[in-house]
Every structure is written in structure tokens, then in C-alpha cells.
Image: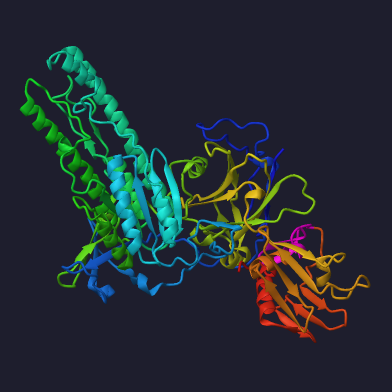
Amino acid sequence: MRTLRILAITAGLAAAASAQAPPGPQSNPPATAGALPPPQSSPVIATANAQQGTPPSAPLKTNTRLIAVDVVVTDSHGNAIRGLKAGDFQISEEHSGPQKISQFQFIDASSHPAPVYPAGLIAASPGAPYLYTNLLPEKMRVPPTVMLMDALNTQIENQSEVHRHMLMLLKTLPPTTPVAVFTLGHQLHVLQNFTTDPALLRTAVDHTLRSPDIADNPQDDANSASNVFLDQNNDTETPANQVLEDFEKMAYEQQMAVRVDETTDAMVAIAKFLGGYPGRKNLLWFSESFPNWIAPNADFGSDSFMGTADYSDRIRRASEALTDARIAVYPVDARGLEANSLYSTASTPHINRNNPGASLAGTMNRDNNTRLDTQATMQLIADASGGKVCTNNNDLSGCVQAALDDSSVYYELGYYPENVKWDGRFHKISVKTTAKGAKLRYRTGYVATEPGAASEQPPAKLLQQACMDPLPSTSIAMTAETLAPPRGTADPSARYLLTISPSALSLPPEGVSRQLNLQMAICEFDRKDASFQFYPRDLSGPVSEAVFQSWQTSGIRDIFDYQAKSEDYRLRFAVLDVPSGAMGSVDVPAHPKQFGMIPSVSSTPGTPAAAAASGSAPAAPPPPTHVGFKGSNGASSLLDWTGDAVSYHGDLGIDLGARGLFGNLFTGKYHCQAGSLVPNDISATAKPNFVLTLRKPDGHKAIIDLGGEAPAYSGDLAVDPSARSYFDYLWKLCHCQQP
């Protein structure tokens, strides 16, 4: 039977794991034999060290909401205007008047600012494939851009044209621009996550084509049942045919509603995925879009209002999610400058032989109206987010380049709303500048939800949705590191070190401590990735001030042991800050054979590696002169003191080697608590020995003391720079600092 044991290695997570876990989502099959056990059998072990008399510092969250507004400022020629100051801008809210600009920054992507990562977290990199994170890769410093090929709403011939333009664009794309390629069918698919590698992007773009499932308007479809029946009846309408037309109008609206729901759901998922990344992001939406409504039609069927619909609420929901995530949407009409579909060789419209002129005119009018309605949807989403729509233009790559230019140079304004009623409604904002001739583009407003207002949905429902979302959420930054399983484990076992950034959590003071209201879920997906088992846990409880301060440097860290089976595909760790609604999630492989390099340690035969940590030389056999490290991909390195100095060399990174030795010396015996290693056995009193003695057979030795504020070196054996870098990394691990 598989188990997942959770050990909280940072104090302050008060467990409420005794509550019975609710069943998984109703759409998923019930739990079967061999599934992950409920929380009772895998509790969170936690302590809360409240320090009496310690005054709490300011909370991470306040009750005032900062509204960020990214403003693109261009002259009459479309060139960016630089050099403006905060005093050159004015922000006003509808019904609330002028607002005070509290934050101001000029963003120039060409300066490549270094990314700032949350406490305790590091971004994944090609050198650390054992790390899984919802952060952007470290080297990507330019605002990210998502290319979304919307095959759900785009005919295949127009997809092919977009494909050609996308390949042209990649040839001129700045090498520092991180781009991801998504495609939308009935589900959202990630073809390529963020990368600056043109070859990877070209490969992804080549896989964007999908067969669409777009229903034609039955009134203009020559093959619809009602038009076939009409042809057989000499184009004479009958009550029976009108009943059939009414049915077709309803069926057409239902199919359209599915497309609208799937498209807007995908946009909300992208907003959750990009929302945690700082600054302005771009979404390039290549699509024919969908109409914002289906108008009444008196010329088809018996009921003019049959099959009508208004999709404005769904469009508004997607727009608000994208806007709150600071994502500027640039819809690109995949039809370009195409002629009316009546003149397309692929189109076979129905023509009423009794009145062909009126029939042709009606078909052309409906086609034009549909095009205008779909472009209106694009315009609504672009305007709300501060983007720009590209329609009636065959230079699609030029449209995309304009979007990239906008994200390169802009002004970031922020204000705390004053005299505002937090009524949950959309509040319009306006931005003006004193710069003459300037054109501004920015988000049109925000939804005035009260700061700290709890969601109407229960936490379990929100966490289930986080697991069902096609993309991870990034509002709470997380990193999962795969570790070597405990020694003596017979069955396939996976071990994870999960680090959660506290920067997005609500931790209000309560007396001498703080209150954490954090819910977590582990979702276990099957091999087909079609369903998952859902296991929630409550990590809420009081947090001492000492623990709170330690979180600011190391993050909230837990170790998870998981007994896998061969058909497991992946796990998703999801966390929810209940007061703010902020969500974070990260995906990890569920079986050790899917992991990347995990550091392992070996030493001279007959001598355990831990002997190097002893303060005295063993009697026999002779002391080792090196410790070897081997990654799962075959790479290896040595910490070597054979010669005149201690050195670290080989093709396995310092980080992997240091983690290998740390795991050999301390993992399984100690865990991090409030920034220090403490014994796993609460009855044990022995402290970890941070003094390493590397002794040669001739008596020369190097002594490395990792217990102070920095590594200290003594003895008559030199330590060269490569080894000093190694011990610097090892020192951070010993002091519970994520390097």
C-alpha cells in the first residue's frame, strides 16, 4: 500500500490533519484500493514555539490593496516616450476622483534587471533538473510572452497562415525574450514552456495545427437538415421546417457556448499561471475568436429569440482575471484581410432559389456581422487589459512585434484606492499625462473586491479546481526538490523537499504569535492524466515570531515521502492562502525513475563517507583521501585531498555534490527548525557535528568548521577555491539556507 509521509521541517505549521478528508472531485472516479491514504495516516508533524513577550512585527499583508497600472506611452509615430516622471501622470477613478500615485517605475527590458525570487526559493535551471518550480527560469529576465494558437475557434486554413507568420516572427525575435507556445483545442496544451531557444520554439510552432470543431451557422449551411428539407420542398417554408430550424438554432448556440466556456476558462488558467510573475506579461492570441452575442433572428425558425445568447459575463470574467494578473492581451485576427466567406471556394452557402438576391444579401450581412462581433470580443479583451487588437491585417508578424515592443518599455504606476467602496463591482480608471501628443494604453479598471475578503467557495473546492487547471498557479511561489529516498527503502520511494514562499501569505499577528491560514492538497494523477485522487490537508495554526522570521530567509519547508507504483504519472502540490485567495501549485513526477539527477555519495571502499566528519582518525583501514559523488545521469565528481590541497573537480555541479554529502551526513537524523538543524528524535540531545576533518595517511589534514557565521579553515592542508565554493554551499545547507 502506498503511503505519503509528511514531515514539517520548519516549525510553526500547526496540523489539523485529524479531520476526515473529503472525497475527490465528483467528476473523478472514487478512490480505489492502493490509493494514497487519507490524512489521518500521514499527519503533518509540527511544533509551534511561541515566544512569550516577543512583540510581533508588521504583518506581511495589509488591509489596503495596491492597484498596479502598466502604462504604454507612445508618440504619434508609435515610438515609446521615455523620461517621464511620476508627476507627469494623473490617475482617477470613476465616482472616486483623483488618486495618489504611491509607486512609480520606468521599465526598460533592454536593461535586463536581475530577477528577485521569493524567500527560500531558487529557480530551476538546466544544471538542476531535480528542481520543479512555478518560478520563471533564472536566466529569463525579460517579461515573458505566451503565444496561444486558438485552434478551437480558427479554421484550419487560417491556422496554416498563422503558422507561417509565427515562423517568420521567430527569425526576428530578440534572443532574450522568453516565449511559451500554447495551443487550445477542447483543452489547453503547453507545447513549449518559456524558453529563448529558437529551435525549441520552431518545433513547438510546428505542432500548433489542430483540426477545429467549428459548427457552421445552420441558416447558411447548405448541408444543414433544415436547408436540405427546404431544397426538397422547392424552397418553401413549412411549419415543420421551422420547428427543425428552431432546434438547429438551439443546438448551434449550445455548441457556441461550449466554445466560449472553453476559451474563457483557458484564459483564466493562463492568468493563474502568469499571475505570480512580476510586471507586465504578454498574451498573443491568434484566433478567429467568438461572437460576444447571438442576436435574435426573425428570418430563421418560428421564434426570433430562440437560440439567442449574451456572452458578455464570460468575456468580462476572463478579462478581469487577465487584467488582475497584469497580462496585456494582443488578439491577432487569424483571418487577416480575407474576403467575405461567400466568395471562398471552401464555403458552400445555401441560396434560396425563390429569392436568390435577398438570400445572398442576407448571407453576406450575417457573415459581416459575425466577423464584426468576433472582432468586438477581441477588442473588449484587448482594451480591458491594456493590449491592442490586430485585425484586418495580413502582417501578423508585424502585429506581434508591436506587442513585444510595448512590453519592452512602459511605466509601472501603483496606487492605494481612496474614497472607494469595495462593492465587488468593476471600477473604471483613467490615466492622463502632461506629455504633449502622447498616446496612452493601460488597463481600463479593476474589480473592487474587499482586501482579505474570503472566497465564496470553500477551500477544498478551490484546491480541487487548482488541481483540475491545465497549468500550475503562481501567486504563491513554490519549489519542489526531489531527494534521494531514505536508506533501506525496498519499494520504489520518492522523496520531495517542498519550499513555499511566505511573501504572498496572510500572517496577521495574534498576541505574541501570528496566525497562518493555509490549506494544502496533494493530487495524484493517473498514467493517462485524465483523473486524480485528491487529498487535502490543513496547515493552519499559530506561528511564533521566531519561526516567522526564519521563514523570511528560508521559506516554509516540508519533506514528503511517497511510495510510488509504476503507473503513477505525476503529483501536484497545491496550497491556498485562505484569507487572500492566493494560490500556488507545482507539478512533480510521481516515480523515482522519472527524476532528473539526484546527488548520491560514495567513498573509498571499506570506509563510510561519514568518517570524514569525525574529529579523530580511524584506526583502520587508512583514512579516505576523497569522497565521490555520482548523479543519476552518470556524471560524477570528487571532493579530493589526495594531493597538496583539498579540491573539488569533475562534471557534477557543486550544488549536487554538496547536497550529496549533506544528505549522507545529516538527512534522516536531523531536520530544519527555525533556521537550525535539530534531531528528528525529539528525545535526542546530540547536536550535529559541523567540523569536518579531512586527513591524509601522512598526517596532514584540513579542518573545516561549518558551525560559525561562515566556513572556517585550519590545519596544514590547503583548501583551494573550488573546494571553498563547495564548502560555502554546504555551509548554507547546514544552516537551513536555500542556496
Q: Residue 365 or 662: which is nearer the viewer?
A: 365
Question: Residue 594, image x and y in percent?
Answer: 62, 50
Question: Residue 669, image x and y in percent?
Answer: 77, 60
Residue under the image location 8 percent in, 32 percent down? 361
Question: Residue 315, image x and y in percent?
Answer: 29, 43
Q: Note whether residue 271 is visible.
A: no
Question: Residue 686, image x and y in percent?
Answer: 82, 66
Left or right: 153, with 221 as reference point: right
Q: Would you place residue 723 above or below residue 46 in this image? A: below
Q: Where is residue 377, by image quadrant?
A: top left
Give the magenta range: 663-682
Left or right: 204, with 218 as reference point: right
Q: Residue furthest front?
A: 345
Q: Note whether residue 689 is visible.
A: yes
Residue under the image location 76 percent in, 58 percent down? 668
Q: Where is residue 635, by image quadrant?
A: bottom right
Q: Would you place residue 300 above or below residue 278 in this image? A: above
Q: Residue furthest right?
A: 619
Q: Residue 147 or 464: which is nearer the viewer?
A: 147
Count the labels in the image: 0
Q: Please tell me whether residue 669 belongs to the stretch shown in magenta.
A: yes
Q: Residue furthest bottom?
A: 716
